[in-house]
Every structure is written in structure tokens, then in C-alpha cells.
Amino acid sequence: MHLILQSASETYRDSTKFPEWVDQVSDTYQDLYFSSPSSQCHVSSPKSTTNSTLSQTEDPKFSSPQSPPPRKANATLIMLARNKEIYQAISSVKHMEDRFNRALPSPYPWIFLNEEPFTEEFKERIRDVVSGEVEFGLIPKEHWFQPEDIDEKRAYRGRWELIMKGIIYADSVSYRNMCRFNSGFFYRHELLQKYKWYWRVEPNVKFFCDLDYDPFLFMEDNKKEYGFTITMEEFEPTIRSLWPTVKQFMADHPEYIAPDNAMKFISHNNGDTYNLCHFWSNFEIASLDFYRSEAYTSYFKTLDETGNFYYERWGDAPVHSIAASLFLNKSQIHFFSDVGYRHEPFQHCPQGVENERGKCSCDPDDNYDYTGASCLSRWEDVFR
């Protein structure tokens, strides 16, 4: 009827004509819905707004540059542990994961090393608590056990002398194996060859503060090579011949001594004697390239040839610390004052603003920095 009346009556036709703007809108909708298949992909009802956005993102016409992946250092967390230390290891891992690693966009991997194969239980329990990748490695026998050319009778006499003086681990050959391994072999393990940085973590340690930055990237960006949290003096009877050996090495290889070194930290008389100060090596964030260097390789070879890791009880802490103090410029060594850390019976607890920023759970008054045999003040003297 509408069509008949429009044809028969001009008056009716004029009174029922759509305004011009309606034709324009109609043309627009025609273009939106029927112009091309690709146009149809980008028009949707309000219920499918999310799908529309995804479609635009996928279409090259709407794509924007992708954000680069989060920056990450070529680094690993490493722990030397035995199967029987499973719960101590889990505790340390949980502390590290909760305070630092788990919050990263891409967590750092873990490496666990043992002189005997890890049990399936150990591996499964560790996998349950780490947030990233994890590898388990067996230490080669030649890197761990007392070498055959060590005179066991002489080594036994050395152990007995320390027992009589009440020195901790005086009678332990296993402890000596560990110190020698950490001094000259851990960085040679096949699992570490792909990495440039490591953070040493031991069973049954505690981390008290949240880290809102990446210590590995801090080291890399600021040209640091070795980082510590606690310093102290070594037991002199355990390293009687260490410094004379080091002095001879320095005389034979002056080319390895850094021009702006930290000799002042380890000696009060420009190297004539050793003041026993060292960085407590159960916590270390450091460059593996430092240990792979010609200087350190030659240095450890000289130390190892004396046999005094067994005839005395040379620890990896003074061995590492002396090397870092001599072969690195002092600016390449960093005190991580903001990392709350405990290895029984000592701890470093950040002070003031650092304690608050890290949401630390340690008591600031329980802090080894300037007490007992701490060497932190001597480290600060290096920069005065």
C-alpha cells in the first residue's frame, strides 16, 4: 500500500520521504557491513568488544612495536649441598625465591652440586620450590677428593695440631675437600660454563629483605666483579703459610696486580703481613670470568701445588678475598649493604632506610658489621 500511494500521490510521497541524513547513515552502514571481508572482522556488537580488540592487535594494520623482553643477566644461583641437607637446602631456596627470584619476570636458574648423585627425593622437593629452571650436577672425583700425591701422614699431623688448638673443622677432610673445590674447581664444572655470573647460596641460610632490583644487572652495569655482605678475620693457625705463598706469587707475577687494588683491606703494612681479613664467601655474587682469568688460574695452581689445603686448612674465603683484593681494582668490589643475610652464627642486617625499603624482617641491632672480628671498618678505610 505504501508503494502504491507513493506512486499515485506526490503529496504522500513528499510527506513520507526520509531526510537526507538518513541516506548518509545508510550508506555508512552499507560500507561497514558489506564493503569487504576484512572490514567485517573489525565490527562487532558490544558483547564482543574484547574479540574486536584482539582482532585489531593481530591485524598488521593495527599492530604496534612489541615491548622488548625484560633484561636479564647471564647468571645462575648455585648451591653445594648433600642429600641429607634436603630441608636446609629447601629453606634457603624458599628464602631466596620469596625475597628475590620469584618476583622476576624471568627467574634465574638454579644449579645444585654434590660429590655423590642427588636422590630423586632431593630433586623433586627442590623442583617443587624453585620458580625457574634447575639442574643437578655431580662433582668430578678429581675436583673433590684429597689428591693421591698428598702425604697423608703429614696431613694427619696437621689435622691433629688444629684439633689441639680447638679449631673448628680441624679434623675434617671433607671440609678441606669443600674448601679446595670452592677455591679452584666450582667454576670449572660443566654446568657453569654457559654462565657469566653466579650467586652462591648455602643450605640453611636466611635472606631477610625484599630486593627491588637485580644484583646481577647492578654488577654488570657498574663494572663490578665481586660482591659480599659480611667480612671477618680468619683463624690464623689454619693459614700459617698462605701469605708467604701469596707474597712469592706477587713477586713472581707483578703483572697480575691491579693498579688501584684493595691491598689496604688485607694488610696494614702494604703487604708485608696479612691481617686475616676476608669476605665471608658463603655469600658471593661474582663474575665467573674473574676465576677463569689467567691471574686467578695461575694463582690457584700455585696455592694447590703446596698441598696446604690439606696440610693446613686453607679456606676458600681467604683464598677468594686475597685474589679479589689484589687482582681487581677496589672499585670492582661491592658491599651489598642492603641485602639482609644470615649464616649461623652471624648476620648482616641493613640499617635505616635500607631496612625499611627492603621490608626487612631482621633486627637492625643484631648486626655483625662493626662487632667482634668484623673487618667492615677496614674495608671502609680502603676508600678513605
Image: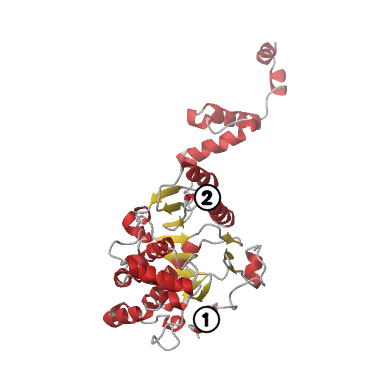
Name the residue at 56% across, 71% down: 337
Contact, mark 1 vs mark 2 (Cβ under 8 Å): no
The quadrant of the picture occupied by the N terminus is top right
Q: Position of residue 254 (x, y in %)?
A: 29, 81
Closer to the chain start, of discs 1 and 2, is: 2
Q: Position of residue 240 (x, y in %)?
A: 40, 78
Name the foreground residue: 378 vs 227. Answer: 378
Between the residue at mark 1 and the residue at mark 2, the CA separation in whole angstroms equals 38 Å
Q: Is residue 375 visible?
A: yes
Name the foreground residue: 129 vs 335. Answer: 129
- Say which of marks 1 and 2 sits in front: 2
Q: Is 289 situated above or below 269?
A: above
Q: Secondary structure at mark 2?
A: helix
User: Residue 355's image quarter?
Assistant: bottom right
Q: Which mark is residue 113?
A: none
Q: Position of residue 207 (x, y in %)?
A: 58, 61
Residue at numbered disc 2: 86
Q: Is residue 224 visible?
A: no
Q: Position of residue 79 (x, y in %)?
A: 46, 56
Other-residue count near label 1 (Cα within 10 Å), few / some / many at <14 / 14–19 / ≥20: few
User: Residue 23's image quarter?
Assistant: top right
User: Residue 46's image quarter?
Assistant: top right
| Colour logic | secondary structure
> Mark 1 belongs to which amino acid?
Glu
Name the foreground residue: 87 vs 376. Answer: 87
Q: Is 151 situated above or below 123?
A: below
Residue at numbered disc 1: 380
How many labels were placed on the picture? Answer: 2
Q: Is 216 situated above or below 322?
A: above
> Mark 2 belongs to which amino acid?
Ile
* In the displayed structure image, the side of residue 378 where residue 15 appears, left or right: right
Other-residue count near label 2 (Cα within 10 Å), few / some / many at <14 / 14–19 / ≥20: some
